[in-house]
Amino acid sequence: MRVLVTGPSGLIGSEIVSFFDTRAEAVVGIDNNMRADFFGIEGDTGWNLQRLRHTTRHFRHHDLDVRDRAGLTAVFVKTQLQGRAYRIFGYKGKQVRDNIHSYDVASLIEAIARNPRGGEVYNLGGGRQNSCSILEAFDRAAQLTGKTMRYEYVDTPREGDHICYISNLARVHQHYPDWTITRSLDAILEEIIDAWEARL
């Protein structure tokens, strides 16, 4: 099997590279680090590309633009650990999202590749058990780090933002009953915190 990964230096992409590096004969990545152009040095994923180059056996990267968001949780954890203020837009910080670990995304991609179903579309996320509001995430991260999150509030929500989004995984489970969420919300937060503490 040969695997093509677009955005291999990002949160999800790098996990997919690592996942398939032990399963595929070749993993090809296409990425031009546009996050650095958009977000400056804090968005630069070059460090992650270097990590992949040193830890994988079958990965080859190509600096290309595939044109010819990784992670909200990671952003707020980094902000918290640095003692900076995070800006919440609208809904009093009670907007809810479900969270999924990139490993679980990669394992579903593998399940689909092994048994593809033509024309199907799936909602993919962590489901209700891995959902939380922004304020709940702040509280849990504070319990894990011992640092209270500083934040400022803007009453106007971002355009197009939902107050609550939780993925319905029923079709995924119906078509791929052996696939399941393996990483809890706490496990995801703990991994993000450990990674940022090692880098900061």
Image: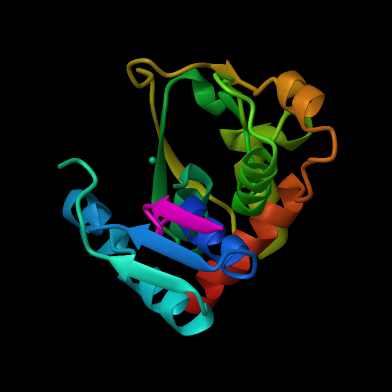
Q: Residue at x 62, y 31 (%)?
A: 124
Percent of width and height locating residue 163: 53, 16
Q: Residue at x 33, y 68 (%)?
A: 61
Question: Could one spot residue 182 in this view of the protein?
Answer: yes
Residue 9 lies in the magenta-colored region: yes
Observer-nearest of 99 and 30: 30
Question: Could one spot residue 142 in this view of the protein?
Answer: no
Observer-nearest of 47 and 185: 47
Say which quarter of the image contains residue 22: bottom right
* The C terminus, quarter of image: bottom left
Q: Is residue 106 above or below residue 50?
A: above
Percent of width and height locating residue 120: 59, 20
Percent of width and height locating residue 185: 72, 46
Residue 198 lies in the magenta-colored region: no
21 sits to left or right of 47: right
139 sits to left or right of 29: right
Observer-nearest of 109 and 89: 109
Percent of width and height locating residue 176: 77, 32
Q: Residue at x 21, y 57 (%)?
A: 64
| Magenta region | 1-10
Q: Residue at x 80, y 23 (%)?
A: 174
* The N terminus, quarter of image: bottom right
